[in-house]
Amino acid sequence: MANPTAAMLVIGDEILSGRTRDTNTGYLAERLTETGIALKEVRMVTDDHDAIMAAVRALSGAWDHVFTSGGIGPTHDDITADAIAAAFGVPIDVREDARALMAAHYEKNGIELNESRLRMARIPDGAVLIDNPVSIAPGFTLGNVHVMAGVPAVFQAMVQSVLATLQGGDPVISRTLRLDRAEGEIAGPLGEVAKRHPAVSIGSYPFIRQGRFGANLVFRATDTGLLNEAVAEFAAAFPDAAEI
Amino acid sequence: MANPTAAMLVIGDEILSGRTRDTNTGYLAERLTETGIALKEVRMVTDDHDAIMAAVRALSGAWDHVFTSGGIGPTHDDITADAIAAAFGVPIDVREDARALMAAHYEKNGIELNESRLRMARIPDGAVLIDNPVSIAPGFTLGNVHVMAGVPAVFQAMVQSVLATLQGGDPVISRTLRLDRAEGEIAGPLGEVAKRHPAVSIGSYPFIRQGRFGANLVFRATDTGLLNEAVAEFAAAFPDAAEI
């Protein structure tokens, strides 16, 4: 059976303005690859109700899982939970289980559960809470959409909470060869190796270091034997390739 | 008149597998913000013909400009140019102007213009070449889509080539206040300032440092007077806010 698929939706003006560099996508991509879930698409949208709603609907329909980051805090620009509820056509309001979690935590720490903070207990009907060991206010899973915070420490904790509940696939293994040659020199033989080994995905990632061209060739597969065959065939043609 | 809008499309399995962290989006976002062009959406897709084609069509129809990165090199997994031509329904083949640029450069450097390298001279009919001072093989603009390389040094050079030809908008100016308070404490008054200043976009970006919560509040507008009014109003309510 093919491995499960996933998409990531990053929500927030700060990413699109260039003010904040997104690190959540890279983190999620690595964790999913380890788990045997294939990340197939990423979208980033502004803090706009309709844009979030449209992206959630498209991604939720196309892939097995959708992971979102951002827009579930207490401020006026945090509109993700409402947009997700609208995308699924379900009501949303302060939910007692989420409120109780937060009330207990805030009381212990002498923090007031004011109206703004209470916004973080707004959970769409039918959603399952995602544990947030860092700052308590929960994320949630609605249908196949996992809604998480944008602050990297909280996002990462929530991803771990979610992944513990998901069925992964066969882990994808990879081997990487580095060549200090321009891609144009190796593209012909490489393409032939790729054609002869359809079960192995081969990517060529060029780089420039100190003014010289090189390429990392990444061989990926779920079957170790097939992977090693493809690598060996290429390495025979380019003995200067170094495994990294 | 509203500022022009743009989208970014990142193409490549290596980004989605987590092997390579995308830095091109952050670079483009900063350059566009300086230029007064609003980046509204980002998508990242795998090296898949149909996925690239569908994303290009959707983004090209929705926004004024689309910038793509990745997939225009000489190897078998470089399929972007063909997918863009297909998205616009135009033929693609080796074009004499692109071939001549590359032939002259390679001849000077004693490099063979082999069949693989010649793939990089495949340019859709009607496209305008984008200058590549780093490694010569050009990008191209077709309709409102600017197709560029994924290697960051080349991508950045091509972005500069393209931006020199585009009409920007009013630059967006911003001021940032840092508060060592949790968002939940400031969300109420902040929301009221946002409501009273519709011409100012106000984002709240929480962080956790050494176990303590804080937030950066970013005020953005094209009108300095309106921007300063909103900042002053908020700062009067929170004298501990520090401009950064």
Image: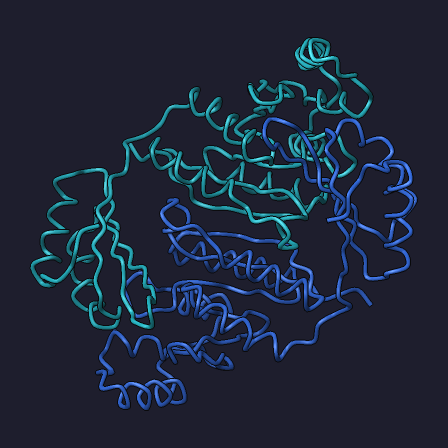
Chain colours: A cyan, B blue
Q: In the drawing, does residue B55 fall left or right of residue B166?
A: left
Q: Position of residue A95 (x, y in %)?
A: 71, 15
In which quadrant will I find the N terminus of chain B?
bottom right
* Residue at the spot 14% in from the left edge and 51% down from the top edge: A230
Q: Position of residue A47 (x, y in %)?
A: 70, 44
Looking at the picture, tell me which residue is in the foreground, B30 or B57: B30
* Residue at the spot 38% in from the left edge and 68% down from the top edge: B72
- Up the image or down, B221 lies above or below A37; here it is below
Q: Residue B192 sits in which quadrant?
A: top right
Q: In the drawing, does residue B229 fall left or right of residue A206?
A: right
Q: In the drawing, does residue A231 fall left or right of residue B41?
A: left
- Up the image or down, B55 lies above or below B233; here it is below
Looking at the picture, tell me which residue is in the foreground, B68 or A90: B68
- Up the image or down, A179 lies above or below B91; here it is above
Q: Residue B217 sits in which quadrant?
A: top right
Q: Position of residue A235 (x, y in %)?
A: 11, 57
Instruction: Specify the farthest residue to the left.
Output: A236
- Up the image or down, A38 lies above or below A169; here it is below
